[in-house]
Amino acid sequence: MGACVERLNSRKAHREYPHSNLRHLVSNVRLDSPDGGKLSVRASLAVYRSRAGRDMCYFGRHRYLLVIIDRKLLIRSKRVELDMTTLRSTGDVGVIL
């Protein structure tokens, strides 16, 4: 177990080093009328990321398809649509997911 922790704390681990500071903001959540046990949800998003002296902002919307199975609300699908015209200045977009 100690070797695993040591490996994950190294710069060679499959993660960011140094870590990003992130803020995920979700607003304007909209629910469509349920359709046969399915529910479409839309929401605006803004993700602010600060890493290695650079600040970046990603903005767009989330789209979810929710289903009810065994009285539980589950996510059937999730889609992120960015409203940005370019990604060159923003770097890695994996932080949104």
Image (cartoon, helix red, strand yellow):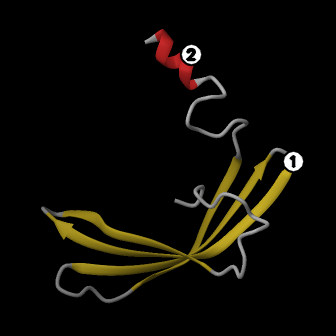
Mark 2 or mark 1, which is nearer the start of the sequence? 2
Considering only vertical position in the picture, is 63 above or below 33? Answer: above
Callout 1 environment at 10 Å: few (<14), some (14 to 19), or many (20+)? few
- Residue occupying image coordinates x 57% and y 30%: 13
Image quarter of residue 96: bottom right
* Residue at image location 65% in from the left, 81% down from the top: 83
Q: Position of residue 39 (x, y in %)?
A: 30, 80
Residue type indicated by callout 2: Glu
- Residue 24 x %, y %: 62, 60
How far apart are the two marked residues, 1 and 2, measured between alpha carbons?
26 Å
Q: Which residue is mark 2?
A: 6
Q: Position of residue 50 (x, y in %)?
A: 77, 51
Q: Are marks 1 and 2 in contact (CB under 8 Å)?
A: no
Q: What secondary structure is marked by label 2?
A: helix
Q: Is residue 30 above or below residue 4?
A: below
Q: Which residue is mark 1?
A: 53
- Left or right relative to 92: residue 61: left
Identify the amino acid type marked 1: Gly
The residue lying at 27 percent from left, 63 percent from top is 74
Name the image quarter holding residue 60: bottom right
